[in-house]
Amino acid sequence: MIEFIKNLAMEAGRLALNLRRDLQEEDISSKGTVKDMVTAADRQVEAFIINRIAENYPSHGVFGEETGQSRTDAEYVWVIDPIDGTTSFIHDLQFYSVSIALRQHGRTIAAAVCAPRLEELFWADAEGAWLNDKEIKVSVRSRLEECLLATGFACVRSELPINNIKYFSRVLPAIRGIRRCGSAAIDLCYVACGRFDGFWELNLALYDIAAGAFILEMAGGCVTDIDGGRDFPANGILATNKIIHAELSQQIHGK
Ligand code: IPD
Ligand code: CA
Ligand code: CA
């Protein structure tokens, strides 16, 4: 099964890369505001993934960002973000990914995140987590002042009661640095392989984080909601190397 998922993510990643080369202005449209965009490539990559799953696993359910849910009561459900980082994709930046998670009875059992411009495939199953063919583990940094973190901001920010600016300004003075790459799936995988020590964000959906959160947990990391509970991503997500989890949580909440 993991070979199927890895190949699917890589093939979908190659498709996204090719579609980016041919992307025209008329392929880009808005989901309601010019900050929240979608491209023909998002839809084509999702259709490719769903067709491949239907051919091989016709009884499985699917939850994809662009097409929604089908057979969600099935034992196995695939959670798909065809292009995580559409803004980067449109602006021709390298930080976008294809994110695919396989869940059994609502629990992720295998996942892959392919960043095609970076030529990186992150994947995990019950055995552990890998970047291409190298096993990965989270970092061992323990002091916030030596940590590099990542965060993100929802594209529709101005309407939100909590838009992350408050948390951002509390965390920033305490840490070595921060990055905003533009793909939550990549952010989580970068924590998994120790490039980042932690990541937090609000207002994400299951398809943004299902694969990355599993890969991070299998690499030894810790994933909770923003208050330390299990209600993620509905109540935000806080993802770390485990060691800094409690301290970062306190910093976020100004304690
Ligand atoms: C977005 C990315 C981004 C995050 C946004 C998400 P999309 O997903 O994960 O990093 O900050 O909140 O919506 O829309 O490019 O699939
Ligand atoms: Ca996404
Ligand atoms: Ca997306």
Image: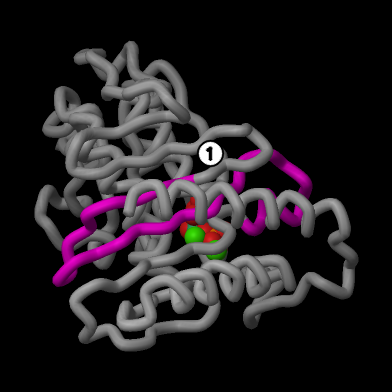
Counting from the top left corner in percent of width and height, residue 207 is at 40, 64
Q: Secondary structure at mark 1?
A: loop
Counting from the top left corner in percent of width and height, residue 248 is at 22, 32
Counting from the top left corner in percent of width and height, residue 218 is at 21, 37
Left or right, 164 with respect to 235, comes to right
Residue 20 against residue 244 in the figure, above or below: below
Left or right, 52 with respect to 195, comes to right
Quadrant the C terminus occupies: top left
Q: Is residue 207 magenta?
A: no
At 31% from the left edge and 14% from the top edge, which residue is drawn?
145
Q: Is residue 98 magenta?
A: yes
Residue 246 image-quadrant placement: top left
Q: Is residue 120 visible?
A: yes
Residue 118 against residue 60 in the figure, above or below: above
At 60% from the left edge and 53% from the top edge, which residue is drawn?
11
Q: Is residue 165 visible?
A: no
Residue 217 against residue 98 in the figure, above or below: above
Left or right, 92 with respect to 233, comes to right
Label 1 environment density (alpha carbons within 10 Å; few <14, some 14–19, many ≥20): some
Residue placed most toward the observer, 191 or 3: 3
At 43% from the left edge and 35% from the top edge, which residue is drawn?
150
Q: Which residue is mark 1?
A: 180
- Magenta highlight range: 86-113
Disc 1 within 8 angstroms of ligand 1 (CB):
yes
At 16% from the left edge and 36% from the top edge, which residue is drawn?
250
The amino acid marked with disc number 1 is Arg
Counting from the top left corner in percent of width and height, residue 50 is at 50, 74
Residue 53 image-quadrant placement: bottom left
Q: Residue furthest front?
A: 56
Residue placed most toward the observer, 128 or 225: 128
Left or right, 242 with respect to 191, comes to left
